[in-house]
Amino acid sequence: MTAPVLQVDNLKKHFPVDSGLRSSKEIVHAVDGVSFSIAPGEVLGLVGESGSGKSTVGKCILRLLEPTAGTITLQGTDITRLPRRRVRPLRRKMHMVFQDPYSSLNPRMPIGRIVGEPLRMHNLVDGSQLERRVSELLEMVALRPELRHRYPHELSGGQRQRVAIARALSVQPPLLIADEPVSALDVSVQASILNLLKDLQAELGFSCLFVAHDLSTVEFLCDRVAVMYLGKIVEMAPRKELFVHPKHPYTQALLSAVPVPDAKAQRHRQRIVLTGDIPSPVAPPTGCSFHTRCPVVQERNRIEEPQLREISGQGHHLVACHLVGPNGEAPDITRETSHAQ
């Protein structure tokens, strides 16, 4: 088997609560024991509600945030505790596309300089070669080379995100982290950006961690999907397997909220509506973190925390739920929620 481009083991990121007046011992458990790997050329989708810790995972991988615990291995190198001076050369191997393309681009720089900045920082090209390479990168993301002289505020949101993608891929990194790259864009623009990412990934072969809360974009782009809830991964499976046979009650609820293009089928779908709000990461529940909202909760779920385990014969389908049997038998959450309503 080919070694993974990225290996994350038991990653944790905790933030101390700042009360302002006195020191506090409370801790925000933003990421609380996440493990996964990404193979060469694979796109892994990381999904969940806002506040589940998805973006924090991406920032910890890039060392924009320092992990509290765990291990991050990039192409065989443990980068978790490397000093900043040793991390800097490795940044050529991992880049990020942020959610808001306007705030992620330097407003004082023209587009050509923004796209060429990573090439200059890593001393890859200079002079006329740099100018030619910038033009190639702009054309690669379907932008006219003459836009290199404009500033970010002179471009549309979709154009700015294309610039961000060109900058991220300028040094041909083996790992790209896309943090909800289309959520800040108009719906009419989202499809073109997703198609661009899919085409570039197929052409360049980079691995990608695609962070999103829109499951339809994940279904279009990703090879595997990991579902996060309150700082933990509760289910992970190949894309088709997860969308056709979701096991965890939380995953089933998320998928029931995704609209389908068939109006008749949409009218007859049974929507799973979860009650209550996501618990505070300052004081996560004991046992299963989802038990406060689960319509099929049992006493064991309130006491014992389920571990992420592989379901027998389900093609690398992992789930963290006491109610899912060893062969993938899952509770009928649709029936339980319809009775409750």
Image (cartoon, grey):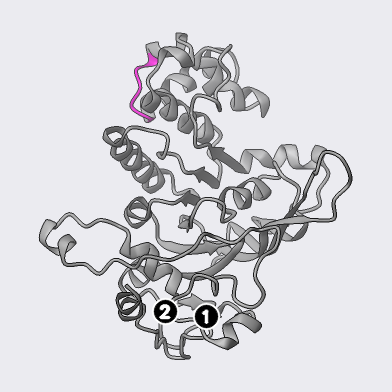
Quadrant containing the C terminus in the rendered view = bottom left
Count how many numbered circles sit on residues in the image.
Answer: 2
Percent position of residue 148, x then y: 45, 13
Percent position of residue 62, x then y: 66, 45
Dot placed on the residue nearer the N-terminal end, 1 or 2 = 2
Please name the residue shown 58% across and 40% down the image: 95
Q: Nearer the viewer, residue 156 or 265?
A: 265
Q: Name the dominant secondary structure of the magenta segment.
A: loop
Residue underneath mark 1 = 321
**Mark 2 crowdedness (10 Å alpha carbons): few <14, some 14-19, many ≥20:** few
Per the model, the C-alpha gap separating discs 1 and 2 is 17 Å
| Residue 318 shows up from this direction | yes
Percent position of residue 322, x then y: 53, 85
| Residue 304 shows up from this direction | no
Name of the residue lying farthest toward the front? 341
As helix, strand or loop, the secondary structure at mark 2 comes to loop
Which circle, 1 or 2, is nearer the viewer? 1
Q: Nearer the viewer, residue 332 or 124?
A: 332
Please name the residue shown 40% across and 82% down the image: 314
Q: Nearer the viewer, residue 13 or 194?
A: 13
Give the residue type that dot 2 points to.
Answer: Gly
Please name the residue shown 58% across and 19% down the image: 106
Give the residue type that dot 1 points to.
Answer: Cys
Name of the residue lying farthest toward the right? 22
As helix, strand or loop, the secondary structure at mark 1 comes to loop
Determine which of the numbered discs, if any, sits on residue 147 in the image.
none
Q: Is residue 208 above or below residue 321?
A: above
Does 337 appear in magenta?
no
Percent position of residue 169, x then y: 50, 35
**Mark 1 crowdedness (10 Å alpha carbons): few <14, some 14-19, many ≥20:** many
Determine which of the numbered discs, if any, sits on residue 315 in the image.
2
| Magenta segment boundaries in residue numbering | 141-145
